[in-house]
Amino acid sequence: MHPILKLVTQRLALGLLLLLAASALIFIGVELLPGDVAQSILGQSATETALRNLREELGLNEPALTRYFKWLFAALQGDLGTALTNGQSISKAVGERLGNTLFLAFWAALFSVPLAIVLGLIAVRYRNRWPDKLISGITLSTISLPEFVAGYLLMYLFTVKIRLFSPISTIYSGMSLGEKLSAIALPVMVLVLVVLAHMMRMTRAAILNVMQSAYIETAELKGLRPFVIIARHAFPNAIAPVVNVVMLNLAYLVVGVVVVEVVFVYPGMGQYLVDHVTKRDLPVVQACGLIFAAVYIGLNILADVISILANPRLRHPK
Amino acid sequence: MNDELKYLLGRTVQGKHSRRAFLGRAGALGVSAAMANTLLAGAARAQEPKKGGLIRMGMQGGESTNTLDPALAASEVPFAVNMTWGEMLTDVDPHGNLDMRIAEEVSSSPDAKTWKFKIRQGVEFHNGKTVTAEDVLATMQRHSDESSQSGALGIVQGIESMSAEGDMFTVTLASGNADLPYLMGDYHLIIQPNGGRDDPAAGIGAGPYKVVVNEPGVRHGFEKHANYWDDRIGHADQTEILVINDTTARVAALQAGQVQMINRVDPKVYGLLKKAPGILVHATPGRGHYVFIMHCTAAPFDNNDLRMALKLAINRQEMVDKVLGGLGSVGNDFPINSAYPLFDDTIEQREYDPDQAAFYYKKSGHDGTPIVLRTASGAFPGAVEAAQLYQQTAAAAGIPLEIKREPDDGYWSDVWNVQPFCASYWGGRPVQDQMYSTAYLSTAEWNDTKFHNEKFDGLLIAARAELDNAKRKSMYAEMAHILRDEGGLILPMFNDFVEGVSDTIGGWESDPNGELMNGRAHVKCWLA
């Protein structure tokens, strides 16, 4: 078997095991929360009778272990079930939400990844001079700003002062691509600001590391232009750490943007998950947890494979 | 026309300023009296409902877990959503009078035990079926049967039997209740085809709008139900409710014109938003109130002197000013205010009196250990700050309070109605009887102060069947006195509903029954 294929298969198998472990952990976590679904649905207005009836209907009287395995077997057959709270099909709801989340993440990544890498390259080219300091200064300030503050600032600027964009980023089917892009402009800006610094700094550090090597000196002595040395000779050897950071940030764009979703009223996975955790809606929490875990594991496998492909020494192990 | 003049004009038409005040202020802005009169006449004409358009509301209080099943509605967005597509037998108008909806007429036997509701002819569900007495019967059965999870279970429990004959729906109660027509306006009791037994969350009702989009926690879209019977409401062709839980985003959406109305304007930004061009901010006194509740059966609160000491040790006006930003009114330790019919305004207002509080505290013989007050930021907005204020004013009377901050998660299951002293809130009810029966009758399921008083219970039952309003009013006043002086309720404040409305909206009316004109602002208003 080709070593890469073998590696991917191994990682996938391990990933599946991790997913199973994650599902068990999520289940235990939700079980440990005070109150139950019935109590959360009915809230302050719960009467004993109503609680009893609702628990019965939702099957909450069965032992936790039975419920977990019932859920697991259904999930293995591709049936994520229905939400306990509103009876909607989870697959359908999650499908829409995940689509929205990926849409937002895609556009944020499309702008932030190339921008971060190019800025990183420029920073190396002018290291310790004003362009480097300016780039680091700006990106580090934007990452230090909490997302919601950045969100409010942009909102104030672009919706209240200059009425360029809509403060509400709700998108739905039936909107044209242009309308959708205009709707998500502000959250994309915020996300780009948030993830830029991490990737930019990593690109800068990784390349600087390589710049110490003897072969770079050779390239310099050959009389190559500094930017060509950085882009053509140093960067390929710095890809592995950069890819890892890029993947971590991509994963963050998918699973960690709940604050941005709330501020801009964007119907993504984060808000959906938080709502259902509050209501102890276990099947939904499980489904979301699994998807999030799968995104993380998948992107990490991808990062590993790319770093190996980028490094001939790893590509041909002894 | 400049913004200030526009603003004045809007306020005057809505009755916030008198005509004379408008003319005076317009004069100060350099507008002649004749011109001002013309303006006013034009603005008043604009108050005639206009048809068509799209009205959007941005609201807090919606989650992706919401359902359209009216039995399970509990938070603000499902409430407003259900008020868009659904309709009850009756409703309560802003002045506290009965508004006949699906029931056209109502009559009762002299003992208020048997009630007959005549079903309006030609009311049509969104699926084209005509509303019949059988549908009404099935609805009430669904909410009252053994397996019901309905929030209205407490209301329909007292029903002994029901029947439907022709266009008449008849209810027989176990004991008389003069308020039954009001209770039938409870927002859970939306009439659904076959009572909603086939699919309770279908969103098919007889209300002015049909559900077109239902994305819980995101948005709810509606279009006009062409065959709706009442053309006094439902002016816009389409309406939409956007869930915007973030306060800042909601205000920004209103300012940017994305939505025309929002609920829950933060008292902190009330003053600023009022100055924003094109926006009116309404503070509507309602029946909702914020409370601290003591269990009358648990030590040390089983001692009425200690309860009295704690009631005297709270500074109500300071709470209204600081916690509500002045957008509310002081409470008087019973859950009724002037927004209720048959309210007695002669009951003496309890004031903050540290000396009296210290006297009662000493008299109670409490051992001086700190009294634990539990609170959570979710108990009511500002509950933690309110508890801290309370701690300070109580300390001035020599009463040590210890504040225990609980997590929001599980507050309603593990703290409220479980711990003997905690912060909470009530949304209010349309009539006094319902408020008292829900939370202060000895046998009530939500008797969260564990208040047991035979005389109070007796008066409540007697007042319920009393059809003479004068007698009834004096009975309610007597009950209020009992609860105020002996109950476990500390009621520092009634909160206003604070809402932001664009000046492109006509027909706004202040409604104490619930926020955003009792959930129907988008149904009753129009685009001016």
Image: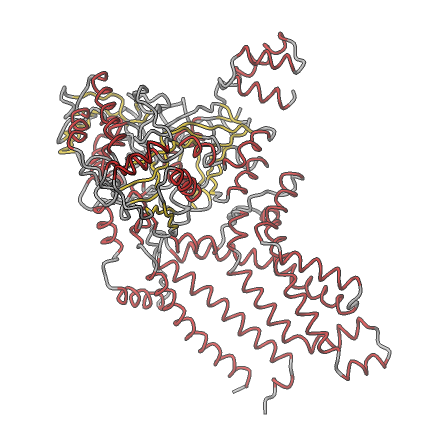
Which residue of the protein is positioned furthest toward the top in this rendering?
B34
The picture quadrant where one finds residue A318 is: bottom right
Q: Which one is nearer the viewer's eye here, B374 or A297?
A: B374
Image vertical order of residue A80 relative to residue B184, above or below? below
Expressed as whole percent of the image width and height from the top left, the position of residue A54 reads 25, 50
State the residue at coordinates (22%, 50%): A52
The picture quadrant where one finds residue A119 is: bottom right
Which residue of the protein is positioned furthest toward the bottom in this rendering?
A318
Image vertical order of residue B474 relative to residue A250, above or below? above
Expressed as whole percent of the image width and height from the top left, the position of residue B188 reads 30, 37
Q: Is residue B197 left or right of residue A208?
A: left
Image vertical order of residue A160 relative to residue A227, above or below? above
Q: Is residue B196 left or right of residue A162?
A: left
Q: Which one is nearer the viewer's eye here, B10 or A3?
A: B10
Q: Which one is nearer the viewer's eye here, A314 or B265?
A: B265
Q: Quadrant of the N terminus of chain B?
A: top right
Expressed as whole percent of the image width and height from the top left, the position of residue B472 reads 22, 20
Q: Is residue B108 left or right of residue A303?
A: left
